[in-house]
Image (cartoon, grey):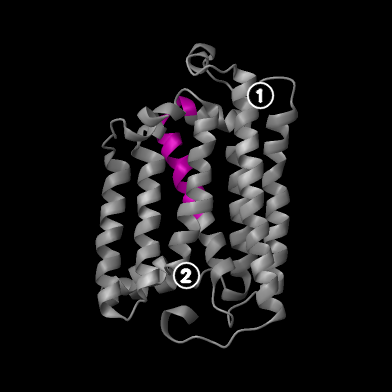
Amino acid sequence: MWSVIAGPWAFEPGVVVPVLLSGLLYAVGAGEVRVPRRMIASFYAGLAIILVALISPLDEVADALFSAHMAQHLLLILAAAPLLAYSRAATVLFIAFPPEARAGLSAVARLVPRARRPIVFWLTFTGIFLFWHLPQAYLWASESEAVHIVEHGSLLISAYAFWTMVLASQRRTPNFGARSLFLVITAFITDLPAVLMIFSPNVLYAVDPQAVAAWGLTPLEDQQLAGLMMWVPASLIFFSAAIWCFARYLSPQPHRPALASI
C-alpha cells in the first residue's frame, strides 16, 4: 500500500498544465476581491486531490484494477468537485479574466437561464455519471487515452456544476429543501451501478485477469470491491449533504455578503 502512495508520480501535461494555470488564475482573481481564506484553502485542496487522482501512482494502479479506477472517480466527484464548488472557483476565475473576456463568458452563461440551471446541472451530472459506468463506456475509456481524458474531465466538470448548485448561497434557487431532494435522488441513482457491480454473478467490465491477479484479486472480486467503494462512501456523502441541506431549510440562515452570496 505504501508503494502506491509514495511511488513515482507521472507528469501528464494534460493534467498538470490546466491545474497550474487554474491555480495562477485563482490567485489573480482572489487578489482582485476579498476571498475568505477557507475558500482559498478549499480551492487548492481541490486541485491537490485532482493531482492525486490523475497523476499519482493511483493512476497506474487504475490501469490494472477496476476498483482503483472507481477510486479515481470518487476522488473527483466527491472530494475535488465539492471543494472547488465551495471555493466559488468559477466566480473567482471569472474575475481573473480581462473585461472583454468576461463579456463573452457572460454571454455564454446566459444561454442557460438561471432558473433552469439546477435541473440542467443535476441531469447533466447524473447522466454523465451513469454513462461512464456502463461496461461499454469503460471499455472505450480503457482503450483510448483521449476518451479516458474526456471521461475524467466530464465527470469533474459536471460534478462541479452539481455541487455548485448544492452549495450556492441561500438566496439562490433552488431552496435548501429542494437541494436536499436532489441529493437524495442522486444518492439512489449513483447506487445503481454500485449494486450491479456487487451482486452481479458475472464480470461486467473488461479487465486483464493477470493484472488483477497480481494484486491478489479475481476480476469478480475487483468488481465487487469497486461497487462497495462506490456504494458506501458515495451514499454517506450524498445523504450527509442532504441532511445538512434539510437542516438549513428548517432553520434559515441570514444572507452573507461578498463571495458567500455568489
Disc 2 versus disc 1: nearer the observer: 1
Mark 2 lies on a secondary structure that is: helix
Tell me if mark 1 has few (under 14), some (14-19) or many (20+) residues whose alpha carbon lies within 10 angstroms of its own.
some
Q: Is residue 144 magenta?
A: yes
Task: Name the amino acid, label 2.
Answer: Ala
* Residue denoted by label 1: 204
The x, y position of residue 165, in whole percent, is 57, 67
Magenta residues?
A: 142-158
Magenta segment, principal secondary structure?
A: helix
Towards the viewer: 27 or 135: 27
The x, y position of residue 257, in whole percent, is 45, 87
Residue name at image x 54 percent, y 87 percent: 255
The x, y position of residue 108, in whole percent, is 44, 68
Q: Which image quarter holds the N terminus?
A: top left
Task: Name the amino acid, label 1.
Answer: Leu
User: Could you say which quadrant of the image residue 90 lies in?
Assistant: bottom left
Mark 1 lies on a secondary structure that is: loop
In the image, residue 144 above or below residue 169? above
**Image-based side of 151 in relation to 99, left or right:** right
Q: Which residue of the protein is positioned furthest toward the front in this rendering?
A: 2
The x, y position of residue 249, in whole percent, is 69, 77
Residue name at image x 28 percent, y 46 percent: 16
Q: In this orientation, does residue 245 appear? A: yes
* Residue denoted by label 2: 109
**Which of disc 1 and disc 2 is earlier in sequence?**
2
